Amino acid sequence: MPKTPYHTDETPETFRPYGVGYIELPCGLKVESRLRENTPESLRIGMTMAMEIISVRKDEEGTDLVTFQFCAVEEAG
């Protein structure tokens, strides 16, 4: 499990590891981001990525708290 300030509803039993990497946006800006893929074999520099919104937990009122992550886009080929 990641250390504080990481705060989700996950437990050590339900936690799923995730990758972390730099994503270069079309404007040239680079952001460090959570990645859905979590093994070096499934990632390569320059691959096309897409942003997705994911829920990390619910607040006291039951509202989903969300963040973003990137995932690999399957390229036709």
Image: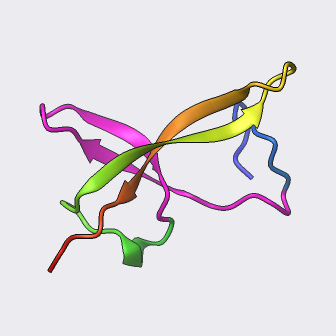
Side of 52 where 13 appears, left or right: right
Q: Nearer the viewer, residue 24 or 48?
A: 48
Percent of width and height locating residue 63: 75, 24
Position above or below: 5 against 14? above
Question: Would you place residue 61 above or below residue 77 in this image?
Answer: above
Question: Where on the picture, by quarter, is residue 54?
Answer: top right
Q: Is residue 19 above or below residue 77?
A: above
Q: Is residue 7 visible?
A: no
Find residue 52 and report its horizontal and vertical position in percent.
Answer: 44, 44
Does residue 48 appear to the left or right of 21 in the view shown? left
Residue 11 location (% of width, % of height): 85, 52
Asked whether residue 43 is in view, the answer is yes
**Protein image colouring:** rainbow
Q: Hey, which residue is sitting farthest top in the picture?
A: 61
Q: Which residues are magenta?
A: 12-37
- Would you say residue 30 sits in the magenta stretch? yes
* Residue at 29% across, 69% down: 74
Q: Give the x, y percent position of residue 4.
A: 74, 34
- Residue at x 14%, y 80% (from the top left corner): 77
Q: How many marks?
A: 0
Residue placed at 21% from the left, 38% from the top?
Answer: 25
Q: Nearer the viewer, residue 14 or 62?
A: 62
Give the image quarter of residue 56: top right
Q: Residue 45's image quarter?
A: bottom left
